[in-house]
């Protein structure tokens, strides 16, 4: 095999890897966007729940406060995961 053939094979392999990486990157972006959209819905539910608890602070049940806290922690983790994926 000639040097020219070697470089041609190398170039083809690099192109294949590059194309695969491009597809994976595109899919990753879509996955992150889907994850973001889900988190945004959870964020809206969290804000509503939090507003209810703040408005009815004295009457808010322990269960309601724990539910809001749990949802808040899940949101925090979800947004951290997205941030880490985008680094």
Image: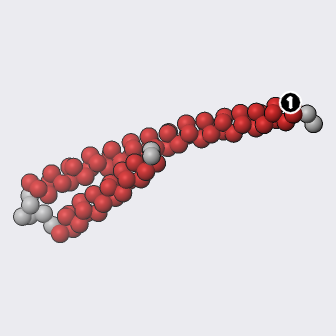
In what element is the residue under mark 1? helix
In the figure, residue 14 lies in which quadrant?
top right
What is the x, y in percent for residue 7? 81, 33
Q: Is residue 18 above or below residue 52?
A: above
Q: Is residue 64 above or below residue 31?
A: below
Is 9 on the left-hand or right-hand side of 47?
right
Q: How many marks are shown on the rendered structure?
A: 1
Q: How is the image coloured?
A: secondary structure
Question: Residue drawn at (32%, 50%), measured in percent from left and top?
Answer: 42
Residue found farthest to the left: 58
Q: Is residue 59 above or below residue 86?
A: below
In this view, the residue in front, 64 or 22, is 22
Residue found farthest to the bottom: 62
Residue found farthest to the right: 1
What is the x, y in percent for residue 32? 46, 44
Question: Residue drawn at (45%, 46%), measured in percent from left and top?
Answer: 87
Residue found farthest to the front: 3
Is 75 on the left-hand or right-hand side of 10?
left
In the figure, residue 66 lies in which quadrant?
bottom left
Query: Alpha-carbon neighbours of circle 1 within 10 Å: few (<14), some, or many (≥20)?
Result: few
Residue of label 1: 4
Question: Residue drawn at (25%, 52%), measured in percent from left and top?
Answer: 46
In this view, the residue in front, 41 or 86, is 86
What is the x, y in percent for residue 53? 14, 58
In this view, the residue in front, 81 or 53, is 81
Is 19 on the left-hand or right-hand side of 56?
right
Instruction: Say which quadrant the N terminus sits in.
Output: top right
What is the x, y in percent for residue 24? 59, 41
């Amino acid at each position: 095999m000639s040097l020219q053939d070697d470089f041609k094979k190398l170039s083809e392999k690099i192109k294949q890897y590059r194309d695969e990486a491009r597809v994976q990157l595109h899919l990753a972006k879509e996955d992150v966007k889907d994850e973001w959209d889900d988190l945004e819905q959870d964020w809206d539910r969290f804000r509503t729940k939090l507003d209810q608890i703040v408005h009815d602070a004295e009457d808010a049940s322990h269960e309601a406060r724990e539910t809001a806290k749990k949802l808040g922690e899940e949101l925090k983790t979800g947004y951290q995961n997205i941030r880490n994926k985008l680094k």
